[in-house]
Amino acid sequence: QAQLVESGGGLVQAGGSLRLSCAASGTTFSRYAMGWFRQVPGKEREFVAVIACCDGTTSVADSLKGRFTISRDNAKNTVYLQMNSMKPKDTAVYYCAAGYGTVQGLGYVDDYDYWGQGTQVTVSS
């Protein structure tokens, strides 16, 4: 049973940056593709980015390309989300998730097996 714990959320001004981390335990981290999603109250959880288990292939939501970057360190069992040029509309709870497969097939909530508890990100204008 994988356990995922996000950290790094908080309050940032518009135009600023944050880096989220997600530490995994209880499983072989390097076998899983890792994704980030976000959710605001009253809306569905939204895909942000995903990185493959093994070859570094990534996919980022079209609306976030150029500002958000996903990376991982398999030696540290950790996946990261670097968020730059942040906007108030980036305000959400951010979740990391683990799943099997290629990045092309991991764009939806149901594609993932394990989830973290989420970390709040608030961008002030």
Image (cartoon, rainbow, N blue to C red):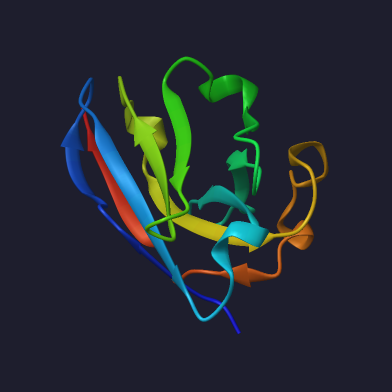
Q: Nearer the viewer, residue 78 or 47?
A: 78
Q: Residue at x 65, y 37 (%)?
A: 55
Which of the pair 44/114 is nearer the observer?
A: 114
What residue do we see at 61% from left, 41% from top?
Answer: 50
Q: Of residues 41 and 20, which is closer to you in this image? A: 20
* Res. 122 visible in picture: yes
Task: Judge left or right: residue 21 versus residue 27.
Answer: left
Exactly how many numbered labels are in the figure?
0
| Residue 88 occupies quadrant | top left
Residue 7 figure quarter: bottom left
Residue lying farthest to the bottom in this orientation: 1
Residue 29 placement (x, y as % from top left): 56, 64
User: Which quarter of the figure is the N terminus placed in?
Assistant: bottom right
Vertical relation: 45 (above or below) 1: above
Viewer-proximal residue among 74 and 23:
74
Where residue 69 appears, as percent x and y from the top left, is 45, 29
Counting from the top left corner in percent of width and height, residue 59 is at 65, 30
Decide if residue 41 is in sight here: no
Q: Position of residue 34 (x, y in %)?
A: 59, 52
Q: Quick one: quadrant of the C terminus? A: top left
Left-right relation of 7 to 54: left
